[in-house]
Amino acid sequence: MDDGFVYCRRRTPAGVKIEEVSGGEGCSGAVWRAMAWQVYKENGRDGYREVLHTDNGAPVLYDEECRISATHTAGLLVVATLAETPGADMECFDRHTALGVDAERADRLKVLSVRERYLGAAELELVPADLLPANIMAWTAKEALYKAALTPGLDWRRDIRIIRLPVLQEDLSEHTAVYGEAEVDIPGAGTVAFSLYSYLSEGCIVTLALTSDSATHLYPKK
């Protein structure tokens, strides 16, 4: 295995466990992703972890009753995990297991040129057109919210709405954060309120989306 891969585990102020795999500069594309996932799987609490997928594509851990969400971008794999929720159905949306994570390079300028494709009219006013970090947070928030909703086909501009962006956190050792707010129209569940949390890691902006009912670990949202 490439020694250039680095694994780390930590908790966020949002109460979500984060595991990251970074490095691996000698690998690229599908090879990098495969190696990063292998590093993650071999660093389980009780040994090797098996990752499966539901019919809608969401990742799940075999024989574990906790929601995970995953994302990868150039040089970074992030897996977010909620606390155990015995008996929960991981195949569909549930306010107690709602979780999404997404990451993007903090210097990804292309996000600025496509903002009108995923931001509604109110959001275009909310997110300054010339402020790259805010646009990256908005992009990752939309992706994280879509994952958390577990509902294919949602319209990013109409059904997923950012109300307030979080404050980007650079030091995860600080157990305080300023959260963002969003809401998603989910068939069968109505309009669901979400909290957003963003932090900087390995040159990437990572955003989490979860509800106030999500089964968090430590430092509950306030």
Image: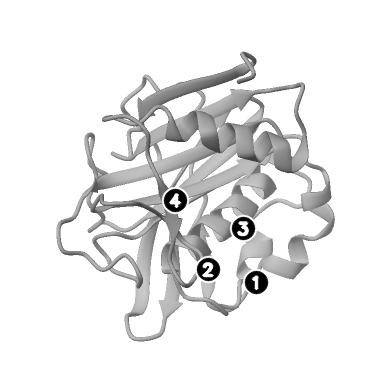
Q: Nearer the viewer, mark 1 or mark 4?
A: 4
- Measured from the top left, where is residue 81 in percent x and y? 35, 44
> What is the number of the mark on residue 126?
3
Q: In the displayed structure, does residue 133 sit left or right of residue 60? A: right
Of the residues shown, which amino acid type is indicated by label 1? Gly
Q: Nearer the viewer, mark 3 or mark 1?
A: 1
Q: What whole-number distance in Å separates the C-alpha atoms at marks 3 and 2?
A: 11 Å
Query: Which image quadrant for residue 15?
Result: top left
Q: Which residue is mark 1?
A: 120
Q: What whole-number distance in Å separates the C-alpha atoms at marks 3 and 4?
A: 27 Å
Dot 1 falls on a residue whose secondary structure is: loop
Q: Which residue is mark 2?
A: 161
Residue 174 vertical position relative to residue 11 in the rendered view, above or below: above
Mark closest to the chain's N terminus, 1 or 4: 4
**Which residue is rendered at x = 38% and y = 50% of the image?**
68
- Measured from the top left, where is residue 156 in percent x and y? 61, 71
Dot 3 falls on a residue whose secondary structure is: helix
Q: Which residue is mark 4?
A: 69
**Which residue is rendered at x = 22% and y = 51% of the image?**
215
